[in-house]
């Protein structure tokens, strides 16, 4: 959710760093299913708007895979600008799925 709401501003860089990269393990179809969940988490008037989410249909018109650099610590990967962390064990589990 934080990666969606608080996207970094500035120019996109088409160059990838010369280091090991984690592979994408989430299919586009599953990522699009997460849009409704992300919207549900951002709604402030949940009592009024939650029931309307059941009938919501999402259609992707375009998609983009965006690279975000993380710093590696002992157990986590840390995003220096967004102040988001990812558990490295969870990423390892996701790769094996």
Image (cartoon, helix red, strand yellow):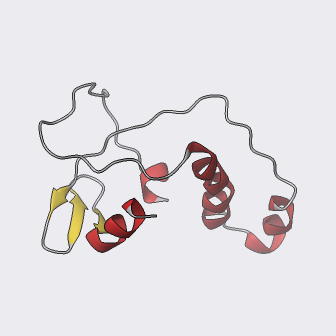
With 59 as the anchor, is 8 left or right in this view? Answer: left
| Closer to the camera in the image, 6 or 79 | 79
Q: Is residue 86 above or below residue 4?
A: below
User: Taking 62 as reference, is 23 above or below it?
Assistant: below
x 66%, y 53%: residue: 33
Image mark count: 0
| Quarter location, residue 80 | bottom left
Left or right: residue 69 versus residue 84 is: left
Residue drawn at point x = 61 percent, y = 62 percent: 42
Q: Position of residue 74 (x, y in %)?
A: 13, 73
Query: Residue 75 appears at what percent x and percent y?
Result: 19, 75
Return the x and y of residue 24 as percentages of the image width and height: 40, 47
Q: Where residue 32 sits: x, y (%)?
A: 63, 47
Q: Is residue 69 left or right of residue 19?
A: right
The foreground one among 90 and 80 is: 90
22 up-or-down from 96: above or below: above
Residue drawn 22% across the image and 70% down it: 76
Residue 10 or 1: which is nearer the viewer? 1
From the viewer's perspective, tell me whether residue 80 is left or right of residue 42.
left
Q: Quadrant of residue 91?
A: bottom left
The residue under the point 57% across, 43% down is: 28
19 vs 53, nearest the viewer: 19
């Amino acid at each position: 959710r934080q990666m969606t709401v608080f996207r970094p501003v500035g120019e996109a860089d088409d160059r990838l760093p010369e280091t090991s990269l984690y592979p994408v393990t989430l299919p586009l179809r599953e990522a699009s299913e997460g849009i409704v969940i992300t919207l549900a988490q951002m709604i402030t008037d949940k009592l009024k708007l939650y029931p309307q989410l059941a009938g919501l249909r999402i259609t992707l018109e375009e998609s983009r895979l965006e690279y975000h650099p993380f710093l590696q610590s002992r157990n986590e990967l840390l995003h220096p600008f967004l102040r988001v962390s990812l558990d490295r064990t969870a990423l390892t589990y996701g790769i094996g799925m």
